[in-house]
Amino acid sequence: RACVCSGNMSVLVNGCPTEEISIKRGLKQGDPLAPHLFLLVAEGLGALMRKAVDIDRFKPFRVGRDGVPV
C-alpha cells in the first residue's frame, strides 16, 4: 500500500517556479529508499526554514528551560 499516491509539484529554477508536474507513482511503506528520501526532504526543509528566519519571514518559537528555538 502506498503512503504517497499522487500530487502536483513544481521546481524552483533560478528562483522561479516551473509549471506544475503531476506525480503519479507511489512510495510504498518499507521501501528501502524511504529513509534517504526523508533525509533529503528534511535537509531541504531545514535549509528553507533557516533562510526564512534569516530574512525575518518566520519567527521560531522557543521550548524548554533553555529556550531552544524550534
Image (tube, rainbow, N blue to C red):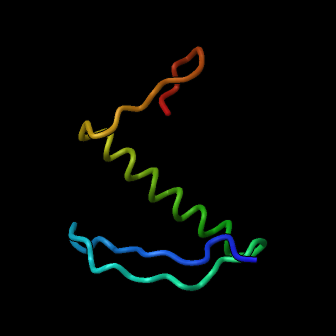
Q: Position of residue 14 (x, y in %)?
A: 21, 71
Left or right: 45, with 13 as reference point: right
User: Measured along the vertical axis of the image, is residue 14 above or below residue 47?
Assistant: below
Residue at 50% from the left image edge and 57% from the top image edge: 43
Q: Is residue 40 left or right of residue 22?
A: right
Residue 33 horizontal/vertical position (percent): 67, 75
Q: Please provide percent x and percent y for residue 1.
A: 76, 77
| Relative height, residue 67 to residue 35 (above, below) | above
Residue 32's quadrant in the figure? bottom right
Q: Quadrant of residue 61?
A: top left
Number of numbered tags placed on the structure image: 0
Q: At 53% from the left edge and 56% from the top edge, which residue is drawn?
A: 42
21 relative position to 18: left or right: right
Residue at (28% x, 80% y) in the render:
19
Position of residue 53 relative to residue 32, above or below, is above
Q: Position of residue 27 (x, y in %)?
A: 66, 77
- Residue 67 lies left or right of residue 3; in this view the side is left
